[in-house]
Amino acid sequence: MTRMVLALMVLAFAGLVLPRLAAGDVLLIQEVRQAERMELPSNGMKMDEVRAKFGSPKTTHAAVGDPPITRWDYEHWSVYFEYNLVLFTVLDKDQVIDKKKD
């Protein structure tokens, strides 16, 4: 009897949690694919190269921490710098999620 209850609990857990975990993986994969189709700053670019190629950011955030990390926000993405070099670029959430209504 307890084995049956335990098995049902495991199945219920798997049915509730695993689909949510898979959805997170899908979102990450969609972000990677979307980023590959866009022209974005690449790792190692300098701040002045980013500004020259992509224009001035909408918003700049002051450096935080040690080493200093700076964020620039553009219309559809943000770029993070360590000192003067690009660490990575992150797409805004609305650029990843398909907004189509079926």
Image (cartoon, helix red, strand yellow):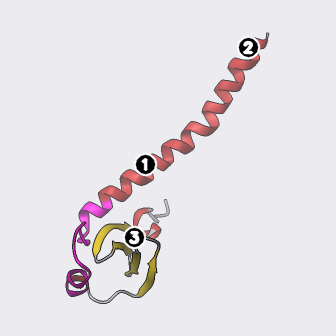
Alpha-carbon span between mark 1 and mark 2: 33 Å
- In the drawing, what numbered circle is on residue 26? 1
Asked if residue 50 is among those painted magenta in the image, a careful observer would answer yes
Residue depth check, mark 3 versus mark 2: number of the one nearer the observer = 3
Q: Which residue is mark 2?
A: 4
Asked if residue 80 is among those painted magenta in the image, a careful observer would answer no
**Which residue is at a point 66% across and 32% down the rendered structure image?**
13
Q: Residue 50, relative to residue 96: is it above or below?
A: below
- Looking at the rendered structure, the kind of residue marked 2 is Met
x, y percent for residue 90: 38, 67
Residue depth check, mark 3 versus mark 1: number of the one nearer the observer = 3
> Are the residues flagged by discs 3 and 1 in contact, CB closer than 8 Å?
no
Dot 2: few (<14), some (14–19), or many (≥20) neighbours within 10 Å? few
- Looking at the rendered structure, the kind of residue marked 3 is Pro
x, y percent for residue 72: 38, 80
Quarter in which the N terminus is drawn: top right
- Looking at the rendered structure, the kind of residue marked 1 is Val
Alpha-carbon span between mark 3 and mark 1: 32 Å
x, y percent for residue 80: 37, 72
Q: Between residues 89 and 4, which one lies in front from this camera angle?
A: 89
Q: Which residues are magenta?
A: 34-52
Q: Is residue 12 left or right of residue 82?
A: right
Alpha-carbon span between mark 3 and mark 2: 54 Å
Q: Residue 24, relative to residue 63: is it above or below?
A: above
Dot 1: few (<14), some (14–19), or many (≥20) neighbours within 10 Å? few
Q: Is residue 9 left or right of residue 69?
A: right
Q: Between residues 89 and 24, which one lies in front from this camera angle?
A: 89
- Residue projecting furthest to the top: 1
Locate residue 35: give its quadrant.
bottom left
Q: Which residue is mark 3?
A: 67
